[in-house]
Image (cartoon, grey):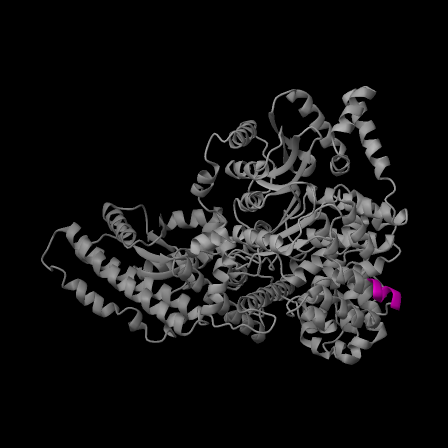
Amino acid sequence: MRSMPARFETLPNRRQIIDRRALSDALGELTPDSADITALRQGMVALMRTALEAGRAEIARRIEEHPSRGTEASSAQAFLVDQILRLIYDFTIQRLYPISNPTSSERIALIAVGGYGRGEMAPFSDVDIAFLTPWKQTGWTEQVIESMLYSLWDLALKVGHSSRSLNEMVRMAKSDLTIRTGLLEARYVWGDQALYDEASARFAREVVAGTARTFIAEKLEERNSRHKRMGDSRYVVEPNLKEGKGGLRDLHTLFWIGKYVHQVSTVAELVDKGLFTREELRRFQKAENFLWAVRCHLHTLAGRAEERLTFDFQREIAMRMRYADRPGKSAVERFMQHYFLIAKQVGDLTAMFLAHLDDSFAARGRRFGLPKLRRSPRKLSGFILDRGRLSLPSDDFFEGDPVRLIEIFALADKHEVEIHPSAMRAAARDAKLIDARIRKDPRANALFLDVLTSHRDPESVLRWMNEATIFGRFVPDFGRVVAQMQFDMYHHYTVDEHSIRAIGLLAQIEKGDLKEDHPLASGIARQLVSRRVLYVSVLLHDIAKGRGGDHSVLGAEVAMRLCPRLGMTAAETETVAWLVRWHLLMSATAFKRDLADFKTILDFVETVQSPERLRLLLILTIVDIRAVGPGVWNGWKRQLLSNLFEAAEEVLRLGHKQKGREERIAAKQQSLKLAMAWNDSQIAKAARRLPASYWIAEPLDILLRNARHIAAAGDRPLSIAAQVYPERGATLVTVYASDHPGLFYRVAGAIHLAGGSIIDARIHTTRDGMALDNFLVQDPFGRPFDDVDRLTRLERGIEDALANRNRLADRLAQRPLARTRAEAFTIEPVVLIDNRASNRYTVIEVNARDRPALLNALAHALFQSKVTIHSAHIATYGERAVDTFYITDLIGDKVDGATRLKALERRLLDAAAGEEAREAA
């Protein structure tokens, strides 16, 4: 608990923000003889409102003029609120509820707690205050407190408040960590100074004394829980400035712990206590200043207390803070890269702070929040163990042989021990010793490859290397993507974090830890001949992002240069370069193409060419998708990749011939016959009625569901069934109806109106003119519809649309737009028409900004173009939608002719851009 922060005293031109003397004089002139409390309070509030608005406008002007002065802006906000509170307090006790002979009970101390107590506030931060009384409240103290709160609420301030006696304050601080932390930051604002001083002394004596270890443990546990809630990474692309990992709350936690242990009042005093060096203090203040600047801009733009740095604000804040575009990197990407580097600094400071703290508590027990050493390794190449952590025998140990900068991480991996923070700090300091000579050193490269391809925990050790900046120094191409964000809604992490997570996932798959999620990949991983090729490919697959070209092509060039340096053979180098060049091929083929079309498989195999490459590519594709972020991987993607792998493997094994196709169809028909208990005649009838493409395209479980559906439908011209399909994490919607033009776009519109999103569609026509269409549908959160009422509503909506019972187009137009975050991105629609990708169909791929009912609009455009859709494949990558259609003209031929193709492209472009065009109009 403390008095006015020093940071207020350094505020320039404080009276331009608020002139308390002038305001006090103006308040004194408010009808001086009046006894009308309500009128007096209203007059006071009106004056305060004008002062508050003027003060906020002045602070906003200052940060607009100096957009990087974050701590100054946050101090100015708190200073403004201080003066407003003091004026309201004085006016309340002098004019509204004056008391001539106060008793010892009629005393109030007004104190600031929490962030406001620190003297830091963003434009829309809560005003956290506490009213302290010596004992139980009297009638007068209740009147004063109530009147002040009403005045603050009338000013539209969001007030967090408490009213406690001294004894209540002590009792509650002992029992509640949040209250104790708030009071730790408590600061005298106005009122009875002696009462505040007594509260401060009692807090130190009765609450803090002797409880430091408990407080530290509780705060570190609270921090870990908060990190887990926020995604447990400081490299999420829409970070929470306040609560996220590497955010302001992490800096606050360090100060709280230091203050609790050493009773200091400022961060600077922690240097004298040995918890920070002068350089670490400078980095703390730099990080704090930057984060506060961003937070103040964020609050101002949002017009509310917003803490999440979402895409729609990132671009505007980058402009406000005067970041500029550079070749290959936009202003917003440069701003966010700076943000992530600051968040990384906060992580480094935390590690060092805890190490200093640990040393000061060394005699009293084991370290804070860190595991005990499992064993004591012997051969440490000159390094030493300090309380179970790898450390240096002398401060100049790295200078003697800079290869040790790599070796320390290889030893940490080999012996499964942590690196002492002081050694990490020395490594970060000496990282500049890694020059061209060290990068070419065969021993250094062998040690690095040992870490990368470790059978233990390569993810953790590579992350340590990255934290110490050794990784980027040793592999400069990797250094270019450190803290680099990808400004889209698909990728959740920075490029370096994504790559390191992918390596961790690869290690888990190889160990069999993810066997349930990836049975195929887990089995294949043990058969690989080229294990280290795979690890290096995963590391390099995104290494050329942000260079202003195709990162796959540029990444392959990086691989050709880097792999020989790492000690890889010419054959290994070629395979790594191939994998980096084609690392998106398998997902693009599986998610955007019709795997039932044999030409798709042949084209894919023509690029892959070998079974080993196919195995490597499958695992690389899986870890790449999973490392994008939580919720991106699902059962449907697993099934599509497995189908493509198995079809390609069969072609490679049988020498590029379409053998096995007839056998596969026959096997499926035989399995269906047994499952349905059909006789030969019944299966023969089904085989004649449905084309070969149907039997190839659909897995056995859908064949079975379709057969039961058709049997239940009998002679009805329309039958719709919606059922949960847990294997794919979606709902299977089957429409069995008399085939007619426009069926697909009507179904797509009805599914959208029911709140669904189509992720895949297979459209089949029986030889007697019935449509049998299978749609995979998810809700807006990527989950299946599983409620009976919603399934029924879905079925009824499709039935109404097909029977034309309501005006579908009007209802779609009336539906309000969602997906406001996607509007932060500008995506020009592109239509690609390919007559070579399939022997039977024209393949159309549409890239556009994702929005509700996009698929309906595209399908309607195809209907107007008088073409038949045979299958549709829907993929979304954050804000970007990629919809692929396999079509023919109405007589079953490919669509050709330059004029017709141009008209088709124009119509689809208009449909894809429809929403934006309407908005612009």
**Residue 767, position in %: x, y?**
71, 30
Q: Where, by quadrant of the figure, is residue 78 drawn?
A: bottom left
For the N terminus, the quadrant is bottom left
**Residue 325, position in %: x, y?**
54, 72
| Region in magenta | 570-575
Q: Where, by quadrant of the figure, is residue 67 drawn?
A: bottom left
Residue 572 on the magenta span: yes
Does any portion of residue 401 appear in the rendered image?
no
Residue 354 against residue 516 in the figure, above or below: below
Residue 374 against residue 774 in the figure, above or below: below
**Residue 748, position in %: x, y?**
56, 39
**At 27% across and 48% down in the image, what residue appears?**
146
Question: In this rendering, would 658 be left or right of 861?
Answer: right
Which residue is nearer to you in this view: 424 or 292?
Answer: 292
Magenta stretch secondary structure, dominant: helix
Question: In this rendering, would 547 be left or right of 408?
Answer: left
Does any portion of residue 247 appear in the rendered image?
yes
For the C terminus, the quadrant is bottom left
Which residue is nearer to you in this view: 617 or 461?
Answer: 617
Q: How many numbered discs?
A: 0
**At 52% across and 63% down in the image, what residue appears?**
255
**Residue 219, position in %: x, y?**
55, 54
Residue 463 on the magenta span: no
**At 43% across and 54% down in the image, what residue appears?**
919
